[in-house]
Image: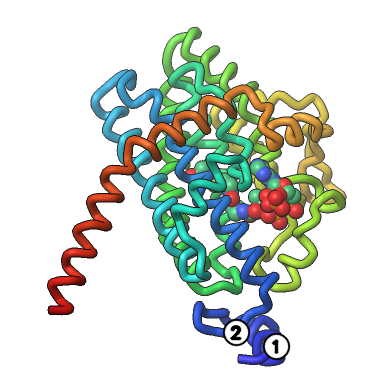
Amino acid sequence: MSEQVFADTIEKDQRIEPRDWMPDKYRATMIRQIAQHAHSEIIGMQPEGAWITRAPSLRRKAILLAKVQDEAGHGLYLYSAAETLGADRGDLTRRLIEGRQKYSSIFNYPTLTFADVGVIGWLVDGAAICNQVPLCRSSYGPYARAMIRICKEESFHQRQGYELLMTMMRGTEAQRAMVQDAVDRWWWPSLMMFGPPDGDSPNTAQSMAWKIKRHTNDELRQRFVDMSVPQAEALGVRLPDDDLRWNADREHYDFGAIDWSELKRVISGDGPMNAERIAHRRRADEEGAWVREAAAAHAAKKREAAAK
Ligand code: 3HC
C-alpha cells in the first residue's frame, strides 16, 4: 500500500488496517493515543475501585464491581489494538509507570464520598462518551472497532452514575449536599479531560487530517457542556460556573474560563493523586509478574511439545 493508497483510503473515509502501509508518524501517533487511552482505562479503575468495599448496598456494590471490571476490559481491548501496530503492552506499561506516557488527568483527583462514584459516572463517563463516540469513526480500524463496544458499556456507566445521583438527591439534605460537593469538585476537571484549547493542541491538526480525531478538543468540550447543563437542572444541582448561560446566537452554552495551569500541572505529574495512582500501578505490575512468567513458561512448553 503506497502513500497515495493510504491518502485515498483516508479521503474516502475508509479504514486503515494493521497490514496496510501507513506513514511512520501515523503509526506513532496511533500508538501514542491508543496507549494513553488504555492507560487511562486501567488507572481509571482506582478512583472508583476504592469504594467497592464501602458501597452502601449490595446492589450498589454489584453495579460498581461491574463498572470497574468493564474499565479493565476496555484497557485490554485498547492494549490489543495498540499491539496490532507493533507495540508491546509490557513496554507500554513500563512507559506509563516511568512517566514516559500519559493517562487522563481526570483520574488524578480523589474520590472523597460515595457521591463521587455517581458524579464520575455522570460527568466523567459522560465526557468519555462525547469523546469516544466520534472515535468509532476513527481511521484506524482496530481502534474504531474497539470503540463500538466500549461506547455501549460507557452508556451503562453514565446511566448508573446518574441514577445513583437521582437517588441521593431524593434523600436527605446531607446526601444532597454530598452530591453538590462532588459536582463542585469534578465539573472543571471533566472539562479539562477534552485536552487543551485547540490553539494550544499540537496534535489536533494532524489527527484531524488523518481522521484519527473527527472533532477538535473545543468542539467536543462544547458538546459536553451543552449535554450536561439540562441534566444538571433535572438533577437539581448547580454547576460551579457563574458564567454558564445559554447563548441564543451561538445556540450553545457560554461557559467560564478554564484554569489551564491546573491541567498543565496535573498532566506534568503534580495533581492531587498522581503519585498514588502510579505507585498503585507499579505495585500491581510487580505483584502480577509471576503470572506473566508462568504464562510465558507454559506457552514455551506447549511450543516445544508441538515442535516435537
Ligand atoms: N490528560 C492527560 N494528557 C492530556 C490530556 C488530559 N486530559 N489532554 C491532552 N493531553 C496531552 C496529550 O496526550 C498531548 O500529549 P502527548 O503529545 O505527549 O501525547 C498533549 O497533552 C497535547 O494535547 P493534544 O490535544 O495535542 O493531544 P491529542 O490530540 O492526543 O488530544 C485527547 C488529547 C483528546 C485526550 C486525545 O488523545 C483522545 O481523544 N484520546 C482518546 C480518548 C481518551 O484517552 N480519553 C481519556 C479518558 S479515558 C476514559 O474516559 C475512560 C472512561 O471509562 C471514564
Identify the mark nearer the N-term, 2 or 1. 1
Residue 220 seen anywhere in this rendered image of the structure: no
| Residue type marked 1 | Glu
Evaluate if marks 2 and 1 touch, with contact meaning CB atoms under 8 Å apart. yes
Residue 136 seen anywhere in this rendered image of the structure: yes
* Residue for badge 2: 21
Identified at 43% across, 42% down, the residue is 157
* Residue for badge 1: 3
Q: Position of residue 100 (x, y in %)?
A: 63, 46
Identified at 56% across, 72% down, the residue is 140
What color scheme is it? Answer: rainbow
Q: Is residue 261 above or below residue 90?
A: above
Q: Position of residue 277 (x, y in %)?
A: 51, 30
Residue closest to the eye, 49 or 267: 267
- Left or right, residue 264 beside residue 288: right
In which quadrant is the C terminus drawn? bottom left
Identified at 66% across, 63% down, the residue is 29
Q: Is residue 235 above or below residue 6?
A: above
Secondary structure under badge 1? helix
Residue closest to the eye, 141 or 157: 141
Q: Position of residue 163 (x, y in %)?
A: 42, 33
What's the mark number on residue 196?
none
Q: Position of residue 265 (x, y in %)?
A: 74, 31
In which quadrant is the N terminus drawn? bottom right
- Left or right, residue 116 beside residue 266: left
For the residues labelled 2 and 1, the Cα–Cα distance comes to 7 Å
Question: Which corner quadrant of the image does residue 303 belong to?
Answer: bottom left
Q: Is residue 61 above or below residue 216?
A: above
* Dot 2 alpha-carbon crowd within 10 angstroms: few under 14, some 14 to 19, many 20 or more: some
Question: Which corner quadrant of the image does residue 205 belong to?
Answer: bottom right
Secondary structure under badge 2? loop
